[in-house]
Image: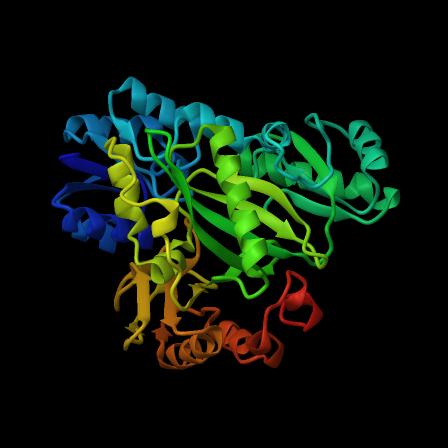
Amino acid sequence: MFNKILIANRGEIAVRIIRACREMGIQTVAVYSEADSEALHTLLADEAICIGPAKSSESYLNMERILSAAVALGADAIHPGFGFLSENARFAELCALCNIKFIGPDSRVIACMGDKAQARNTMIRAGVPVVPGSEEPVRDVAAAREAAARIGYPVMIKAALGGGGKGMRVAESEEELETNFLNAQREAMKGFSDDTMYLERYVKNPRHIEFQILADEHGNVIHLGERDCSVQRNHQKLIEEAPSSSLSRELRRKMGETAVRAAKAAGYVNAGTVEFLLDHDNHFYFIEMNTRIQVEHPVTEAVTGLDLIKEQIRIAAGEPLSLSQEDVHISGHAIECRINAKMAGKITNVLVPGGFGVRVDTAVYSGCDVPPNYDAMLIKLIVHDRDRKSAVRKMQCALGELVVEGVETNLEDQYEIFTHPVYEAGPVDTGFMEEYGLC
């Protein structure tokens, strides 16, 4: 087992990892920017080291400074969390060269699954269903027109190295293709420093279903059930649930087996997520694999009773999985919502809810600053109860108790979703927010 882990991240996920390490008896190192000198993750870790100015490119995305900190302070592993360098194949490769364990998959797997076109082709060879799309990377409008004509409109234009809803546009017709392609390409270049695109058939208002995977270095691969991430705004997730109310027992079994097959085809090791679109005829299609821990991992933890961060660390240390597929049991229903800041500033007061089945993952506290430089998520609110109806009601109560003052947040927007009669009745698809004017 590792003696010391450096957490190459900030915010609530860094705090989450520090707590898991502390419970496992592992020393922790926090890295922080000048803007985060008083951040909670900086204060909680056993050691902390400043790695640069507030700008991410000079701190949390600076591989040399992070690796230098790990070497200088004797860390034998790095946990990247999510975002920042968590899906950067070069960073994982450099960790290996420095004899520091990267808590995640091999750099070659990250590179393969991070290139959406390459990931699609890997899944096709493995017999995993994919949305019809371009087989080769698309780099200009002429190639996009050719691919779209072959696929058929409407088409979804996506950044090959994208994620988080960035670099994505829908073209309903050939007339819309050029403008939307160029806009998506510019956004991809700005967000990922790569303007390679690919196209796929647009599935209108599907359900977004993802399966949590665990795989060890000994060839064992299991799934921990699914999460429903269909409540989205601009392709970015707002609410996640486990399990999904859209799946029958047979469909859940079939999708879970397919997710495991996908992970094996990729040669995957550690925790990961296989994401699918499910249409209204219950046909499902692979869309991508996230090679990291997900923001929404707590809902899976709630219904399985497993600590996914600890599982990641044990797998990275070479231990075999502690359970088989038959040992995985889903209990009750869990929901997570994300409370985001709409502005930077200082939080003057925060009061978080509590009670049976209520969990709050956050790094904010009264008096802390919300810098303008990073992701806007402040709090993840998670509830767990015996069924979906009870969990929705519990979330309504928890949101009613939550207080965040000093900066404007989306708290009222979330409460509006959870009290909407269509959401309460559930399940909903990815068109829910737009259809009911909640965007």
Q: Is residue 139 visible?
A: yes
Say if 152 sits above or below 217 in the image.
Answer: below
Say if 409 sits above or below 272 in the image.
Answer: below
Task: Using the rendered view, name the quadrant where residue 214 is placed.
Answer: top left
Image coordinates of residue 90 in percent, x first then y, are 41, 24
Q: Is residue 51 visible?
A: no
Image coordinates of residue 344 in percent, x first then y, are 41, 60
Image coordinates of residue 45 in percent, x first then y, are 17, 47
Is residue 11 shown left or right of residue 228?
A: left
Image coordinates of residue 251 in percent, x first then y, are 59, 54
Say if 266 sits above or below 7 in the image.
Answer: above
- Between residues 222 and 297, which one lies in front from this camera angle? 222
- Between residues 105 and 328, which one lies in front from this camera angle? 328
What colour scheme governs how the chains and residues are painted in the rendered image of this protein?
rainbow
**Residue visible at 57% across and 37% down?**
190
**Residue visible at 30% across and 71% down?**
348
Is residue 99 shown left or right of residue 145?
A: left
**Residue visible at 81% across and 37% down?**
151
**Residue visible at 25% across and 46% down?**
310
Q: In which quadrant of the rendered image does the C terminus lie?
A: bottom right
Marks counted in the figure total 0
- Between residues 111 and 68, which one lies in front from this camera angle? 111
Q: Residue furthest top?
A: 97
Q: In which quadrant of the rendered image does the N terminus lie?
A: top left
